[in-house]
Amino acid sequence: MKPEELIANYGGTFSRELGIDLSGRSGEEIFRWLVASILFGARISWKIAERTWRILDRLSLLSPHALAVSQEEALIRALDEGGYARYDFRTAAKLREAAKTLIERYASDPEMLHLQASGSRDLESRIMGLASGIGPLTAEIFLREMRGIWEKADPPLSELAFREAKSLGYLPEGIGDRRLALELLPAAIDLNEMEAALIRKGLSRS
């Protein structure tokens, strides 16, 4: 399958599918993607995460201030409606803490977080430091679609995309370095679009 066909068949970036425009580096749009990344990072299906994000969007709960001042009960109800019944308390706490930390440390602006980071590793640490429970997976989900937008966003190719790229013959069989793999993917195709399509293809198997 050619890379163009892969993207046509499986779709591009997850942020774009949600109607989020990261290209202008708008703090509001970046935060909306951060919330989506936190939801996607939970041990739950991507469809449930996407549905829950849209519910939060409908309830105007996708800004730092709105989440920070939200009533815990209302937020938990929204998460339950989306399908987060097992993780509702934990996820609600994580979202509210991330919003409050962004307000207190970075004046509500994700761009400030990026500006203050000394490099890609520090940027990842700062994202995980926004709230208890934000781990490497969530940071990777967030950063892979910020690649090419934030200069310090430099995550390796995701594990799932890496496996799918090898199975499709986009990468040599002997390669084991996911960071090196980024340099070996077809250069003419938008990397973020391709990675998202590879992930979607992998998820379609489960």
Image (cartoon, grey):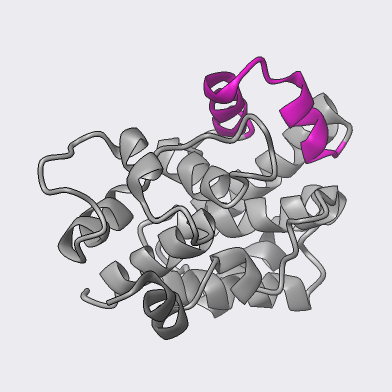
Q: Quadrant of the C terminus?
A: bottom left
Q: Residue at x 66, y 56 (%)?
A: 33
Left/right of residue 66 with respect to residue 77 in the rendered view: right
Q: State whether residue 115 is above or below residue 93.
A: above
Q: Which secondary structure is most common in the magenta stretch?
A: helix
Q: Position of residue 102 (x, y in %)?
A: 77, 35
* 113 vs 97, nearest the viewer: 113
Q: Quadrant of residue 76?
A: bottom right
Q: Is residue 167 magenta?
A: no
Q: Is residue 120 magenta?
A: yes
Residue stretch in magenta: 108-130
Q: Quadrant of residue 126?
A: top right
Q: State whether residue 90 is above or below residue 175.
A: below
Q: State whether residue 83 is above or below residue 95.
A: below
Left/right of residue 147 with respect to residue 29 in the rendered view: left
Q: Position of residue 138 (x, y in %)?
A: 48, 45
* 189 vs 156, nearest the viewer: 189
Outermost residue, top side: 118
Q: Position of residue 8 (x, y in %)?
A: 46, 82
Left/right of residue 5 with respect to residue 21 in the rendered view: left
Q: Position of residue 105 (x, y in %)?
A: 80, 25
Q: Residue at x 61, y 19 (%)?
A: 119
* 79 vs 14, nearest the viewer: 14
Q: Residue at x 35, y 57 (%)?
A: 43
Outermost residue, bottom side: 9
Q: How many marks can you see?
A: 0
